Amino acid sequence: MSILKKRTLVASAMFMVLFASFAYATPKIPLGEEVRGIKLSGHLAGRKVYKLGADINAPGCWQDSVQWTGEALYFGISSINFSELASGNGFKYKAECKLPSVQEDGRFDIYKATLENGRWKLSNQIKLNSVESDAAIGVDGANIAFIRFFSPPKSFDIYLSKKDERGAWTPPYPYSYNSKCKEDNPILFDNGRKIIFESNRANPLGSRCERSSESMSLWFSKISENGHWSEPTLLKGDPNKGEKNTQPWMDENSGYLYWTADKEGNAIKRVLFHESHAMTGSEVVLSPNLLGLVNGSADGQIVFIGEYSEVNDYVFIACAEASQGGNFMKRWDIDIDICVIPPNQ
């Protein structure tokens, strides 16, 4: 082969690499103010955490249930006062929360945000939202799972939807193995054919529930050859050690399952995972300043985190910041927003 031909092939290969990197590059995420109180470990060590701006985090509102797909940000918005709810004072609403004009009431609705000219543009997922409260979103391509809650007697059930040929979501339908127990935070993967969700069910069919609605475990189910969901099975290994394991997310590129270990300081952990089995021991990647709520150092600190998702080196989480003067633990006010961890520049 001539030197000229070799150089031509090398130049052509370099062009293809550069073209691919530009074609599939993640748009630069606009960062808000840096937040304090989160310790980053493992592959996130050394990075910084930022709270998104007011085009996502409306002041006084509760933003939660975040999932980043690499192209769009899905999340829920509510004006429910988290501090009052967590203090056992029922559902109260924050007057200072200015919800999007398309939202009917203060309960959660699902939104999608995409980047246009460096800013987030919101669209309301109107065919998914209902008069009930809808959030806890898991998106996998043309499939979505979410929870309808705060509407007894069928609170905390999983609903599913697919995109039709026009790209619109079809009317939601219930997951086959909803139960009288509490289901929450479903995540879809393998092109919507597999699901992991949390539940306080005491057996696979959910005919018995754990005494506490907070005793949550992670369950796995997949679509069988006949097109039906399989009976849920309990995840084996570290993801179900302890009393309360929540908010799963599966990274199919790396093979890691992430989840929130609530009884281990509300830390987000990860483990190599296949089907319904953890393949290795787990590691902590994020932990908030939960102890600060007790020792008095929580002011301006992130004290709870959850709903991890990572695509193209950008990590999104729900992050709860404490400030003095609320009813939570008779001392703190807690605001839940969406935070981002960008790649090191």
Image (cartoon, grey):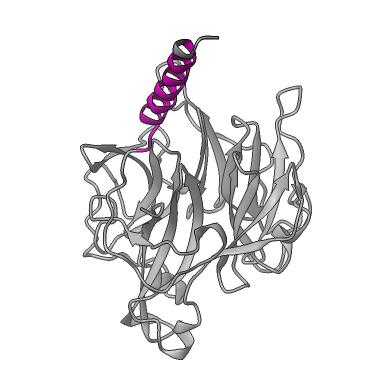
Residue at image x 42%, y 61%?
47
Residue at image x 32%, y 55%?
106
Magenta residue span: 5-26
Q: Nearer the viewer, residue 211 or 118?
A: 118
Magenta stretch, overall SS: helix
Looking at the image, residue 59 sits to the left or right of residue 181; the answer is left
Residue extending furthest toward the front: 3
Residue 62's x, y, as percent? Answer: 35, 60
Q: Nearer the viewer, residue 189 or 204?
A: 189
Image quadrant containing the N terminus: top right
Say if 218 sits above or below 138 in the image: below
Residue 9 covered by magenta stretch: yes
> Residue 169's image quarter?
top left
Residue 189's x, y, as percent? Answer: 60, 37
Residue 55's x, y, as percent? Answer: 23, 50
Residue 181 covered by magenta stretch: no
Say if 137 sits above or below 218 in the image: above
Looking at the image, residue 270 sits to the left or right of residue 46; the answer is right
Say if 117 sits above or below 284 in the image: above
Q: Nearer the viewer, residue 152 or 75?
A: 75
Q: Nearer the viewer, residue 262 or 180?
A: 262
